[in-house]
Image (spheres, rainbow, N blue to C red):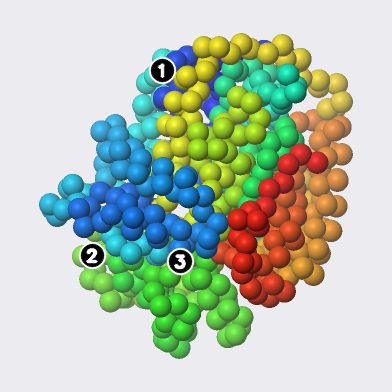
Amino acid sequence: MIIMDVDTLVLGTGIAGLSFALRASKFGNVAVVTKKSDTDSSTNNAQGGIAAVLSSVDSYESHIRDTHVAGAGLCRKEAVDILVHEGPARVLELADLGVRFTRGDDPTTMGFDLGREGGHSTRRIVHAADLTGREIERVLVATVKANPKINIFEQHYAIDLLTENTGGKKVCRGASVLNSDTGEVIVIRAKITMLATGGSSKIYLHTTNPDIATGDGVAMAYRAGAVISNMEFIQFHPTTLYSDAARNFLISEAVRGEGGILRLRTGEAFMKNYHAMADLAPRDIVARAIDNEMKKSGEPCVYLDVTGLSEEKIKEHFPYIRERCLEVGIDIAKDQIPIVPAAHYTCGGVWVDTMGRTTVENLYACGEVSCTGVHGANRLASNSLLEAIVFAKRSADDAAAKIGSLALGDTAEFDMTGHADRVPLNIIEDLESTVRTAMWEYVGIVRTDKRLNKALQVVEGVKETADKLYDTGILTPSLLELRNMAQTAKIIIMSALRRKESRGLHYSPDYPYLSDKPEETNIVIGED
């Protein structure tokens, strides 16, 4: 058993975790834990870019309005105002750090080539071709690795948050962490803990997310007693490549922003039948429209047509998408792209205030694992990376102001005595498949109470089994992921059952109307 003391513990190495770690290193030593390699994150897969008001023909008011419209009346006003007003400065900081954003010669855009995506009323997407996330990760990882006050622990998996009750409050004291290579458990005691573990979409059968997106942060925070908010709002990316040879590959919303058109097999452009913005409608509307058209036709996919764009423009703006499609025999300059929706982004998460503080003392959350209220019932395209960098700074500022008065807790060692039985991998995989299939079939783009209750029955059975396996089993990453997936899936289902309306990403034919009191339907779930 190893016990390690640090000033700040960061769980996750996406844009949120790395940005926070860099800032936290200014006021103490930092341990960064990631269950895979340092660049394995949803940030690394982000194609589109970062939304920010950097054009003289754009305005804060316009970005705020677009965010609220997409969020379907549930966005937290103060959080949106902070996001939009503080965002441009954070983007410029990334550029100063060395992120090579695509440049242009328009004098009104501060030298950036600004794209447009669904739900945005103007061009405001700062990007690095169509691999923005990968470029940001490249710079942040290199900067973090060069910082002597930050230690990255790769192949280490957080088991649970360490908490104690002090003065009537639940206080976070760090986390217990499994070394995936050795099987040894490390207790990391910390004054400040940041949850930046990313999303939950791997709990769905079809997803754009990397395999690490198993809802770990939400599950750990829930077990620690933190409040979880709005988990029913799972965003399905409308345009994922329909090909077994390119699993989980999304086609950026920026493709439609540049003129891509959604079509049926017959060639009909159908989005005009669903929304005034047609192919540039918000994601929830586009995903639901595609789902409806597929159900009507019985076809396994629809098509995204960019053949109207010049080959030169395609090579300049979407080189990565073009290359990946060519690998499966699709020349997007000549061929229509077969696409289907897939689980993409978790708009809810661990509830935080405008400084990133959860309801557990000294525990912060940032990025997709958190719920700042910025996204409401549906995330506006390219607001996610912006949210991460804006609230990472605010969290770091808040932590810096109080860390001098904090002490390490007297945390007990992790008890390994019960974890003795080998759990066969095929059993874990079968249970995981059961969760993912139930979530896809019953808790997808369109839900009903009957289907949700069926999913709940299935998931509760898996969760009961997973908890028993955890109590007695030798700890492995797969077992820990199964435990977290089952817990997070149950939270999503319970949240969906409690929302008696259709709003944003949550659509139920049982309740096809909007509640007239949306502020009272912002569902939260605390500790059992």
In the image, which disc is placed on residue 229?
none
Q: Is residue 400 above or below residue 339?
A: above
In this rendering, position of residue 155 left or right of residue 463: left
Q: Reading the chain from its start, which is encountered first: label 2 or label 3?
A: 3
- Residues 52 and 134: in front is 52
Q: Residue at x 85, y 33 (%)?
A: 471
Q: Reading the chain from its start, which is encountered first: label 3 or label 1?
A: 1
The amino acid on which the numbered mark 3 sits, given as a three-letter code, is Pro
In this rendering, position of residue 432 left or right of residue 391: right
Q: Is residue 325 above or below residue 389?
A: below
Helix, strand or loop status at disc 1? helix
In the image, which disc is placed on residue 313?
2
Q: Residue at x 39, y 74 (%)?
A: 277
* Image x and y of residue 143, in percent: 36, 26
* Image x and y of residue 317, in percent: 27, 59
Quadrant of the snapshot with the N terminus: top right
Report which residue position mark 1 lands on. Answer: 26
In the image, which disc is placed on residue 282?
3
* Image x and y of residue 410, in percent: 72, 11
The amino acid on which the numbered mark 2 sits, given as a three-letter code, is Lys
